[in-house]
Amino acid sequence: MYRTLRGRWVLVGLGVALAVAAAVAQAATAKGTFERTLTVTGPVDLAVLTGSGHINVRAVEGNQVRIRGLVEARSGWWGNNSLDPEEKVRRIVSSPPITQTGNSIHIGRIEEKELQENVSVSYEIEVPANTRFKGETGSGHQTIEGLKGPVQTSTGSGHLKIFRIDSGVEAKTGSGHIELADIRGDVRAETGSGHITATGVAGNFRGDTGSGSVELQLAVPAEADIETGSGSVEVTGARGGLRISTGSGSIEIEGQPTEDWKLETGSGGISIRLPAEAAFELDAHSDSGRVHTSHPVTVVGTQKPNALRGTVRGGGPRLSLETGSGTITIH
């Protein structure tokens, strides 16, 4: 009896596997490309929105915007789509969602419902350097480089790489890494899960990640505000106000405090490297750990191994340092 039932279940499982394999085999795919060249006469406003697909934008010389699109479509596993993939691709390629009004160019999502399902459109775009950009994709990576900006871009899931922008940047991804380099202007970077790396930032910085590390290198005196649920934080070139909070992870700072710093971690060490002549007020506390400093501190109150309050070289900006478990070191 047991062997009979087991045999029947084996046959049922085999049947399901064969059905799935047949359905996958029937899921046809199709690809197609299109190109458009648009002429502009001044600063460009470019907006790119796609439901699924990558977006790559880079600056080139000239007064033209060149758009190359890659359309990919596949049928549903069970063949219940109203249009086959080839027809979807043909219709999108023949009439891509691109509009131009003067120097404003809009590349939009596919509006026809029957063309939306199981379709992705990726874009390679060349623009004059004097371009402002806004981008959005439901899922896909983005790379933007060489623009005057500002740049405002987001993706539901995918990595963002933004380089050599001459004004502010706002970058957001639900899940993915954010990489920034050589940004002039204020930066706002946010990811639900992923690392944030920013180098050569010449402006105020705000970074948020649910889980992932943050590495920041500031090129000018500026404010920095960083928050992560779990992940380490490293900042170099800090010469302005600084606020850092992480649920779990170490904090490493190199710079010169010219305004107050507030650093907090639930579990992890805090390490700060300052110039030998730095003057500041110190309030450092570790629930489970010790506080060390090589700077001469005039102690206020009672000094403890895990807590230290006082002034250094007559005082200055306030350094408030706190960790639930970990060592605090001020070099």
Image (spheres, rainbow, N blue to C red):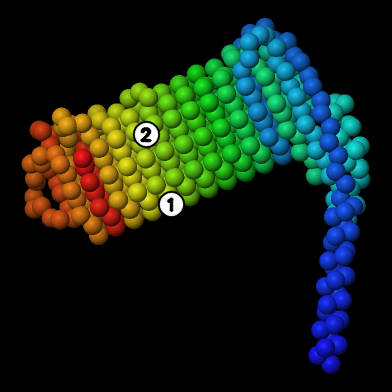
Which sits in the foreground, 254 or 308? Answer: 254
In this rendered view, identify the residue nearer to me: 35 or 223: 35
Task: Provide the secondary structure element on which disc 2 rests.
Answer: strand
Quarter containing the C terminus: top left
Q: Is residue 302 visible?
A: yes
What residue did someone put label 2 on? 224
Q: Height in image: 5 above or below 68?
A: below
The three-letter amino acid code for the residue at tag 1 is Ser
Q: Which mark is residue 284?
A: none
Please name the residue that numbered disc 1 is placed on: 230
The residue at 43%/52% (across/down) is 230
Residue 100: horizontal and vertical position, in percent? Answer: 74, 17
Rendered location of residue 234, percent (x, y): 37, 40
Left or right of 146: which side holds 297?
left
The numbered mark, 1 or 2, whose residue comes first in the sequence reads: 2
Callout 1 crowding tier (Cα within 10 Å): few <14, some 14–19, many ≥20: many
The amino acid beneath tag 2 is: Ala
Residue 3 location, x and y as percent?
A: 82, 88
Where residue 154 sits: x, y (%)?
60, 35
* Residues tagged 1 and 2 counted as in contact (Cβ below 8 A): no
Kindly identify the residue that appears in the image at 53 percent across and 48 percent down: 193
Report which quarter residue 218 is drawn in.
top left
For the point 38% across and 43% down, which residue is it?
A: 233
Label 1 or label 2, whichever lies nearer to me, is 1
Where is 130 relative to 233, above or below?
above
Residue at point 35% right, 27% down?
222
Left/right of residue 251 with respect to residue 280 in the rendered view: right
Disc 1 element: strand
Give the quadrant of the N terminus.
bottom right
330 relative to 157 in the view: left or right? left
